[in-house]
Image (cartoon, rainbow, N blue to C red):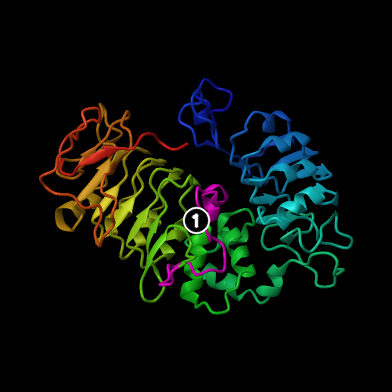
Amino acid sequence: GNWITSADECDWFGISGCSDADEDTIVAIELFGNNLQGSLPPEAFLFFPSIKVMNLASNQLKGPIPPEVDKLLNVGILELAENQLSGNIPSGLGRLTNLDHLFLQSNKLTGAVPSELCDLRTSQSLGLLWVDCNGDPPPVQCSSTCCTTCFTNEPITATPDVSTGRDDSLFVMPLTHSDSNGSLLTTLKKMAHDGGASLDDTSTSQYKAYGWLVESDRSSLTDVMLLQRYALATLYFSTAGSGWSDKSYWLSDEEECPSDNAISRNWYGVEECDAGGMVTRLILSSQNMVGTIPPELTHLRMLKVLDLSENELYGVLPTQMGLFQELEILRLGSNFLDGAIPSELGSLVTLQELYLHVNKFEGEMPEEICDLTDESGLELLWTDCGGNPPMVSCREFCCTECFDDNSEFRAFQNETYGSHYPTFSPTQTNDLPTTPRPTFGNTDGELIENPELKT
């Protein structure tokens, strides 16, 4: 929809990460399964030097991969799988030093994986490399230290085909050896919100998280801890984790939780866990996250504080967000989230602070959420209920801060997190003349402006 129209490019289907094409650069093009036909033009790679995610998988693209692909110097995720691309894999891909995930499987590519590309694997900058290196003989030759997963060159609808009878000089996909009876996959499907459909599609962030789990050391993990790691890994893949500002120790075998040691190697942003090792506070604000919020995040069942503000998250907010049982603070401000605010958030009876401002939500604030301000402990509710007309309609005594279309993101000055954060005195007032005042509600709390939305 709306391509080659007068609409701003930032509003074209599959384009994300920009609000004004004249000022901001496009950071993601996601046209998975969009019935694209024909060959890949060189211009697809020449004019997007800042792009971080390009997903053209599951289409009908044919012909070679243009050598101009080496101009995507900032790309972290490149998905060209399940097309009819042919010829050799360009050696120029080895110049993409920011590349973390490269998916080329289920095509008609032939020859050996270029040594320049395998060098990225050796240097550990390229995390996942999926190609058609399975078969007798395999259409693509790949060494055991290069490709991470081998497929046959046919469309994949479930799990990759593997053969333990292949030549040992070729990489046999470890996935089947680590989950040969499918027990892990069965466990994840039982807990899936969609009945496991996303785990049957190799292009999804859920399947990629499963693939990572299979290859990781999980020998000491209980099912509950496996589910927690799966949720975190799904968030990573769903939001282009390869391009995060700080992804320290993510997708490593290090404990995700902080330790009492002088040198803690916990996954960045996992700031607190309970005594049982369950994540209770996840802070990933201003991390250059690009993508959608996966419903699997609610598998973090003990989570009390979730901060994904000041990123480039888009799409609808999953209704499953209402499944959190302990959540007290939810910060989603300053993103590109759209659609209606789900009424299911009204099930978060422990919620104290909810920040939804500076997004693209539309419609009415659900009465179920307003009831939390009347009957439960929801003290702060920020949304885009300013303007004429407002993007979000909010009844009186419900929203405590209203923003309009021209509002810049605002954050509390005091960022020292205690048992309840942010903390402020009732005597403090907002003295920022350039920021629109709330239409009604609580105006307490000294606020500061964030200089700009991170792009």
The residue closer to the viewer here, 1 or 123, is 123
Is residue 90 visible in the rendered image? The answer is: no
Is residue 261 covered in magenta?
A: yes
Residue drawn at the location 63% of the way across and 74% of the way down: 182
Q: Is residue 178 magenta?
A: no
User: Residue 391: horizontal and vertical position, in percent?
Assistant: 31, 33
Count of all numbered marks drawn on residues in the image: 1
Residue 141 image point, x, y percent: 85, 56
Where is residue 416 drawn, in percent x and y?
A: 28, 54
Q: Which residue is mark 1?
A: 235
For residue 225, side relative to residue 85 (left or right) = left
Can you say which quadrant of the picture contains the N terminus? top right
Q: Residues within 10 Å of mark 1 (few under 14, many from 20)?
A: many
Q: Which residues are magenta?
A: 236-262
Kindly tell me whether residue 47 is visible in this rendering: yes
Give the side of residue 90 with respect to residue 254, left or right.
Answer: right
